[in-house]
Image (cartoon, rainbow, N blue to C red):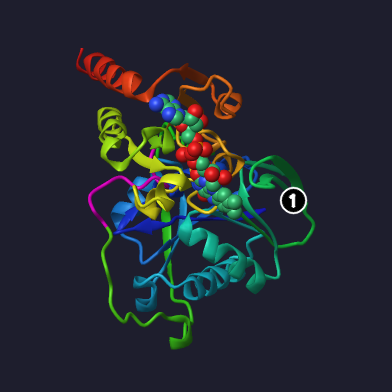
């Protein structure tokens, strides 16, 4: 099979998910051909991707692609997939990837599995598992169509470097894109506050109603800063106006899969679990030993966040320093 791995970048830097996508594509086995696709890519991006096994690369060049438009990206990727006669396109289920994936599948008349947490490629068979019913169950699907598109949940597929990176063979591709594919910016607002985004973070410390008020969230922020983590929140505290919606984790917030998720004063409602249950490790701090979060957590501390969080922060900062 020919597999295309879409290597998504932001602010001119490849995202971590690009390396995860590339690693997942390579994981299919050496009998398959893997082509990485960059949009207005740079030599630095190619070099970085080479460390994760990129050997062949198509660099799609077009001014329209400088401003993200799902229609334009889907059209460009579809044109590359057609010109390379690709059987499978892999992309990350990031905020942008979720917009591009279904559009791309329609353009290619391909079967589509979104937000996969497991992928199996054998010969020309492609199967993947993805969570359903707000993460309560997982369904395994096999794509029956000739062309296939799968988006991969971020942080689930581990990015692996190769021992001996080679210089990728790169070629340019100029897609045919019309102004109808472009987005016309009316105004742009930068929300980059210098804080880590929960959707990208390797470690997240989240707070819930157990914090009792916004004035106590410094406990969550201090622990997060000690761990180099992003701050997350339950919907209850976002609805109460304690925290911004950009931090909300769950069914109506962001889906996250960090290496470590620390839930502080969060009960573990099914809608919250929908957004974080695929985290590698979950540590819950809750004063109610019967809180549902403990059924999902790998580690649990039964107690008061006001006592435990300062101690945890102190202990971790001592450990990190020594
Ligand atoms: C359609 C729909 C979509 C939703 N989407 C989301 C979503 O995206 N994300 C989300 O989070 N929720 C979502 N919800 C809401 C969800 O059902 C819960 O109401 C919410 O997650 C509860 O937030 P919480 O755990 O912070 O608060 P609570 O459920 O009130 O839990 C607070 C917890 O803190 C503990 N606690 C209290 N004091 C302390 C203390 N001093 N020390 C330690 N622990 C303490 C309590 O034991 C309790 O377990 C959604 C609901 C619906 C209906």
Residue 308 seen in the figure: yes
Residue 57, given in percent of the width and then of the height, sits at 45, 57
Q: Is residue 202 magenta?
A: yes
The quarter of the rendered structure image containing the C terminus is top left
- Picture residue at 48% right of the left edge, 82% below the top: 176
Give the residues drawn in magenta, as a range.
192-203
Task: Return the residue nearer the eye: 93 or 287.
Answer: 287
**88 w.r.t. 135: above or below:** below
User: Dot 1, how many residues are within 10 Å of its Cα: few (below 14), some (14-19), or many (20+)?
Assistant: few
Side of 117 relative to 66 (left or right): right
Query: As displayed, is residue 55 above or below residue 74?
Result: above
| Residue found farthest to the left | 321
Residue at (70%, 65%) from the top-left corner? 110
Give the main secondary structure, helix, strand or loop, of the magenta stretch: loop
Specify whether residue 255 is in view: no
Residue 58 screen position, x and y as percent: 46, 62
Position of residue 17 measured from the top left corner of the image (x, y, whole percent): 45, 47
Q: Residue 320 appears in which quarter of the rendering?
A: top left
The residue lying toward the viewer, choosing from 292 and 46, is 292
Seen as rendered, the residue at the extreme front is: 212
In the rendered image, which residue does mark 1 sit on? 124
**Observer-nearest of 206 and 269:** 269
**Residue 6 left/right relative to 46:** right
Q: Is residue 250 above or below residue 291?
A: below
Residue drawn at (47%, 61%) of the image: 96
Q: Position of residue 84 (x, y in %)?
A: 58, 65
Q: In the displayed structure, would residue 275 be above or below residue 223? A: below
Q: Secondary structure at mark 1?
A: loop
Specify whether residue 293 is painted magenta: no
- On the picture, is 271 further left or further right than 65? right
């Amino acid at each position: 099979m020919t597999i295309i791995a879409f290597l998504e970048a932001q602010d001119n830097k490849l995202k971590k998910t690009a390396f995860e996508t590339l690693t997942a594509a390579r994981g299919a086995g050496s009998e398959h051909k893997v082509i990485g696709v960059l949009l207005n890519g740079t030599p630095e991006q190619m070099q970085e991707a080479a460390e994760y096994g990129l050997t062949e690369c198509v660099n799609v060049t077009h001014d329209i692609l400088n401003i993200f438009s799902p229609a334009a990206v889907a059209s460009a990727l579809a044109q590359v997939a057609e010109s390379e006669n690709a059987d499978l396109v892999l992309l990350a289920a990031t905020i942008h990837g979720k917009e591009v994936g279904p559009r791309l599948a329609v353009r290619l008349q391909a079967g589509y599995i979104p937000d996969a947490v497991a992928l199996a490629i054998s010969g020309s068979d492609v199967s993947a598992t993805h969570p359903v019913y707000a993460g309560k169950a997982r369904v395994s699907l096999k794509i029956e169509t000739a062309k296939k598109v799968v988006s991969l949940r971020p942080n689930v597929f581990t990015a692996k470097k190769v021992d001996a990176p080679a210089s990728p063979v790169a070629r340019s591709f100029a897609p045919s894109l019309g102004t109808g594919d472009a987005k016309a910016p009316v105004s742009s607002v930068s929300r980059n506050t210098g804080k880590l985004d929960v959707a990208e973070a390797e470690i997240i410390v989240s707070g819930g109603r157990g914090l009792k008020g916004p004035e106590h969230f410094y406990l969550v922020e201090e622990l997060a800063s000690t761990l180099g983590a992003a701050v997350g929140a339950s919907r209850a505290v976002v609805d109460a106006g304690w925290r911004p919606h950009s931090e909300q984790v769950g069914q109506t917030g962001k889906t996250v899969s960090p290496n470590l998720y620390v839930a502080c004063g969060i009960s573990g409602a099914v809608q919250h679990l929908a957004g974080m249950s695929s985290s590698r490790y979950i540590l819950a701090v809750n004063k109610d030993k019967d809180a549902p979060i403990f059924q999902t957590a790998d580690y649990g501390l039964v107690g008061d966040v006001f006592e435990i969080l300062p101690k945890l922060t102190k202990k971790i900062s001592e450990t990190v320093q020594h």
